[in-house]
Image: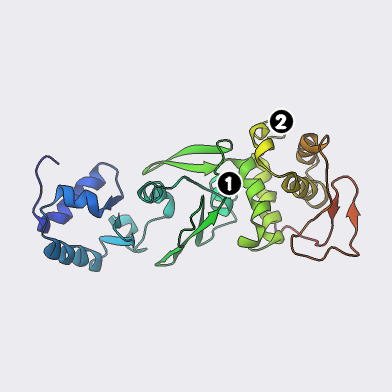
Amino acid sequence: MDRKLPYYHLEKYTDNLRSKGRYTFTLDELRNSVEVNYSALKKTLNRLSGKGKIISIRKGFYLIIPPEYAAMQILPPILFVDDLMKYQGRSYYVGLISAAVFHGAGHQQPQEFFVITEKPVLRNISSRGIRINYVIKSVIPDAGIEEKKTDAGYVRISDPWLTALDLIRYESKIGGLNRVVTILDELSEELNPKDGFDNLINNTPVAYWQRLGYLFDKVLGQKALAESVFDIIRNRKLNRVPLKPGGIRLGVPVDKQWKILVNAKPESDL
């Protein structure tokens, strides 16, 4: 907008953003576009929030709630996560169950939304039935991340192979191995055994490949996928690792090929 609007025309400002495909705005953007009378502006923001037209989910960051989402009183996170992470100045990608749903794991419809990001730790967001969980990774990789088009623009999402490896890495955060196996069962249709993970090899500890390959091989019967994983690690030194980290290690059988301490018996719920 070339001219600043009076603060009481805030609703016109948000309507203009929606006409441009925007679902979010920041307080700084607002101050640059609307006449600044902070006390009056705050009252107007509170009024629109009370009417369910906007909602603040981080200090200084607002969602615009169009009529089609009025009943929910919130937006699906996929529509605002990219703007939110840019606002917070953080590298990120959508991962775990949230990425798996995007790749066709249709039985998974969690209320939780998972975002992988770097330190420092971000406080999780819980608002009106939606929870955004931030999972910290030491380094956000260049490989294994796709940009997908949404109604609000583009969003960074882990590809099927990185999603599978992250499910193994963070299994305790998503409900345990049974849930991991169930999601992998669905996700396997999107995993090409000959393509897609070459660039992930050097960025992923071999233990996660061992666990993933074992689950494909011994639990899900996905022999082609298991073989493709084993091709990655066959010339690497394999140490014995427990299938379930933190579980018992003594007196459990060992899978000779995968060097897995079989201390759990996960099953798919499908």
Question: Mark 2 vs mark 1: which is more N-terminal?
Answer: 1
Q: CA distance from mark 2 to mark 1?
A: 20 Å
Q: Is residue 143 above or below residue 80?
A: above
User: Residue at left 81%, top 41%?
Assistant: 223
* Residue 104, numbered label: 1
Q: Residue at x 12, y 55 (%)?
A: 36
Which label was assigned to residue 228?
A: none
Residue 176 position, x and y percent, is 68, 62
Q: Could you tell me residue 54's position as x and y percent?
A: 27, 60
Q: Nearer the viewer, residue 36 or 257?
A: 36
- The label on residue 194 is 2
Residue type of the residue flagged with mark 2 = Lys
Tell me: residue 144, above or below residue 34: above
Q: Secondary structure at mark 1?
A: loop
Q: Toward the viewer: 116 or 225?
A: 116
**For residue 233, what is the image quadrant?**
top right
Q: Is residue 238 left or right of residue 181?
A: right
Closer to viewer: mark 2 or mark 1: 2
Q: Quadrant of residue 160?
A: top right
Q: Amino acid at mark 1?
A: Gly
Name the outermost residue toward the front: 120
